[in-house]
Image (spheres, rainbow, N blue to C red):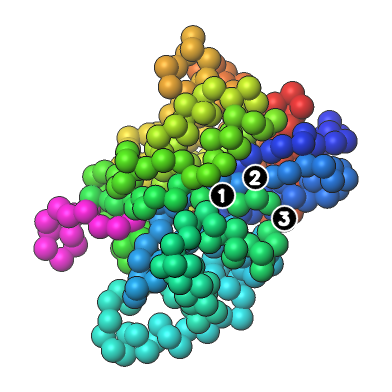
Amino acid sequence: MTSAHPRTLPARITVLSGGVGGARFIQGVLRLVETTGSTGTEVTVIANTGDDLWLHGLKVCPDLDTVMYTLGNGIDPERGWGRTDETWHAKEDLAAYGVEPTWFGLGDRDLATHLVRTQMLDAGFPLSAVTEALCKRWSPGVRLLPMSDDRIETHVAIEDPETGERRAVHFQEYWIRHQANVPAFSVVPIGAVQATAGPGVLEAISETDLLILPPSNPVVSVGTILAVPGIRDAVRATPAPVIGVSGIVGDDHVRGMARQLLGIIGVEVSAAGVAEHYGSRSSAHASSGILDGWLVDTVDAGSLARIEAAGIRASAVPLMMTDHDATAAMVAAVLDLAGL
Ligand code: GDP
Ligand code: CA
């Protein structure tokens, strides 16, 4: 950990998160809260729900569940998603019935979460209330808020590998079934335009002491959260510093498939490219930018001047989330860059 890391963290920290990358980063935030004895710090996580899907009649929320299981010690650490000690009998039997889709990883233990969620939604509870109820079991140590209670589903326009025709598929079909390995042309968060931010979301952005964009996917995690009306404006207007952490190290993502998605939206696959895509909050540099500061990995130290030229304070530190302490050191560097 850097010697400059603060003794006490600010009272309120808000993080905009996807699934695996966001969840691991938040583990580092909680580790730093613990090691600095910042018992008064409340961490709020606004999670992407654009990956959500209805599957066999059940509502599945991959990013909310990844955050909840990871912080609640229920995650399978090797896969990075889904439950520990998982079995797949229901999935196998659904496939034996020939019921599609067969490519989604629906574990038996995981199924319990989806059953509870779906029952509560059927009973009329909004997703935010359902998430709060599920979190009672997992005690994630953060306030976990879905970005919206409204249905938003990211779709990707692809070239169908079988027919050669263009069609839009659910993000999960592109990501899991096709492994982001088919020609793709656009990414659309369906329903976002009509949606409203979930309860507490805009307040968590405007009434925080530090807003962090973790290394979550800039297109389908952070990008989707920012597509919910009101959220980008709240980020631009918050009095808190807004600091992002690059999920691109060198010329590629660290895990997952962010490179493919950046390609679809025409953003250069580099730490500086993503910083420029998010843009500076300073009106002198960008009209709709959201960043005050941007952390890049030490291998990308050569791009610091380019990022600063875009009006974004930048610094280079190791950005590999190898364990909680390494991740906590990244969070300490975020605080340094925020001047906190
Ligand atoms: P998803 O919803 O499960 O895809 O997870 P996120 O969107 O929250 O995070 C995925 C992103 O995290 C990927 O684009 C990775 O590049 C990034 N990521 C994963 N592990 C690391 C790491 O150790 N360091 C950095 N800098 N980025 C990481
Ligand atoms: Ca996700």
Q: Which residue is label 2 attached to?
A: 44
Indicate yes or no: mark 1 CB to ligand 1 under 8 Å.
no
Which amino acid, by three-letter code, is at mark 3?
Answer: Gly
Q: Is residue 118 above or below residue 168?
A: below
Please give the range of residues in magenta: 158-171
- Residue at disc 2, secondary structure: strand
**Gap in angstroms between the C-alphas marked 2 and 3:** 9 Å
Q: Which residue bears the numbered disc 3? A: 141
**Image quadrant assignment for residue 74:** bottom right
Give x and y (percent) for residue 311.
Answer: 54, 16
Classify mark 1: residues with Cα within 10 Å, few (<14), some (14-19) or many (20+): many
Q: Which mark is residue 293?
A: none
Q: Nearer the viewer, residue 267 or 51?
A: 51
* Residue drawn at the location 44% of the way across and 17% of the way down: 286
Q: Which residue is mark 1?
A: 145
> How many neighbours does mark 3 have within 10 angstroms: few (below 14), some (14-19), or many (20 or more)?
some
